[in-house]
Image: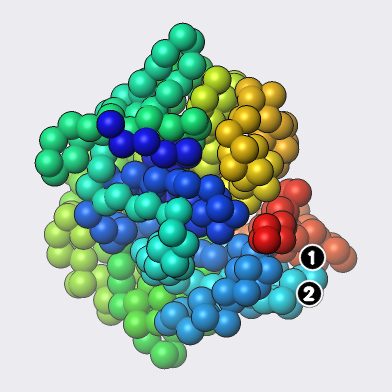
Amino acid sequence: MPQTTCCIVGGGPAGIMTGYLLARSGVRVTVLEKHKDFFRDFRGDTVHPSTLQLFDELGLLEEFLKIQHQEMATVGARFGEYSFTVGDFRHLPTRCKFIALMPQWDLLNFLAERGRQFPSFDLRMEHEATGLLTADGRVTGVAVQTPSGRVQITADLVIGCDGRHSVIRQAAGMRVNELGVPIDVLWFRISRKATDPESALGNVNYGKVLILINRGEYFQSGLIIRKGSFDQLRQNGLEDFRGDIARIAPFLADRGCELNDWDQIKLLTVQINRLERWHQLGLLCIGDAAHAMSPAGGVGINLAVQDAVAAANLLARPLRERIVTEDLLARVQERREFPARVTQRLQTFAHRGIAKIFENPGPAKAPWQLRAVVNTPGFKRLLVRAVGLGVRPEHIRPKPE
């Protein structure tokens, strides 16, 4: 029966970062990823200044930024005919004063390659966790389906990083509190021209919100819709869908023909939830497995990475000494639950504002309240700190000798 000190379930940002940091600290760690690679379309592509700061503290920043990416130092939006700057990251007290736009698979591959440089790092692809092993009221490992059959991996600690549909938290019977969300998002790609607006991230008009993330040759695009309305949109037909895009962002009108099949449009069912208790004896959940975030602000990846840093900072030495207690696991939740709660509250507030946009299907006119807020001194800097740094940003502890 394979054995490890820490078994991490899920090869997303939380899982790979936790594995890398623990292995860097000399902990024997096994990371399980159910897919054969990290390539997933329409994952979050934003790497925020807080995460870039962590790469700088690890001495990996210059190497990381050699990967092809775009840099977004300012964020603009358009509400009807009113254009405005939402935030300017150039004022942040960080090494990188921008958001790096990069496919998530590049981020994960980068961390995985660096993790393999440590002898205690073991990443196993096509290893799907199917359940937990328990003994005497304690989680002792993971049941895994592999290409060669079923195996059981025992561990001193299991960390669930397997996302909002976590098998691990379900197997453990952990209670999840759901926060109502009035929106879903339709993700698709549409080509980009050099003459297109540089920072037209958010576009509001005709009762709809269109997100455009500059990925160089194309926009990764997200149309925010009422929750549960996708079937009706499909019934209305692609021509209506293309017409909506052209009305919201007229500069895209000549590219609607690129969307010729509903298979090009992916539904993201938005959820916000969190566990009441992130841990049991021998088990800890972090990232989306502990607190699923909405796409609002694009902060989900970065919050997951912050969780990973906090977990590694608190647990690396106890794991090396094999003395991890439930009190230590509780400290991880105590450290990271407050940032998750605050962020989710801000996202819920943003969703209420979006839901009001749905109520006016005609041409949008920026309300005076919006104009007043975005022109209030300090508002943009406060918003940028909340998005770029987050609540209670973490820092890398020195590597043990």
Q: Residues within 10 Å of mark 2 (few under 14, many from 20)?
A: few
In-image side of 185 versus 363 (left or right): left
Give the quarter of the figure containing the C terminus.
Answer: bottom right
Mark 1, residue position: 381
> Which residue is found at the position 62% from the left and 38% from the top?
321
**Lateral position of residue 50 relative to residue 369, left or right:** left
Comparing labels 1 and 2, the label whose residue is closer to the camera: 2
Dot 1, crowdedness within 10 Å: few (<14), some or many (≥20)? some
Q: Secondary structure at mark 1?
A: helix
Q: Which mark is residue 135?
A: none
Where is residue 213? Give x, y as percent.
46, 69
Q: Nearer the viewer, residue 322 or 126?
A: 322
Quarter holding the N terminus is top left
Name the residue nearer the viewer: 252 or 119: 119
Per the image, label 2 sits on a secondary structure element best described as helix
Instruction: Choose between 103 and 192: the one closer to the eye.
Output: 103
Q: How many marks?
A: 2
Residue extending furthest bottom? 194
* Amino acid on which the number 2 mark rests in the picture: His
Q: Give the residue at x 40% y 67%.
A: 113
In the rendered image, residue 42, in percent from the top left (x then y), is placed at 34, 58
> Image point 43% across, 59% down: which residue?
119
Q: Amino acid at mark 1?
A: Arg
**Taking 82 as reference, is 360 left or right?**
left
Please report contact status of discs 1 and 2: CB closer than 8 Å, yes or no: yes
Residue 337 visible here: no
Q: Earlier in the sequence, mark 1 or mark 2?
A: 2
Please indicate, yes or no, whether residue 140 appears anywhere in the rendered image: yes
Q: Is residue 14 above or below residue 282?
A: below
For label 2, the residue is 91
Going 39% across and 47% down the picture, which residue do you hit?
31
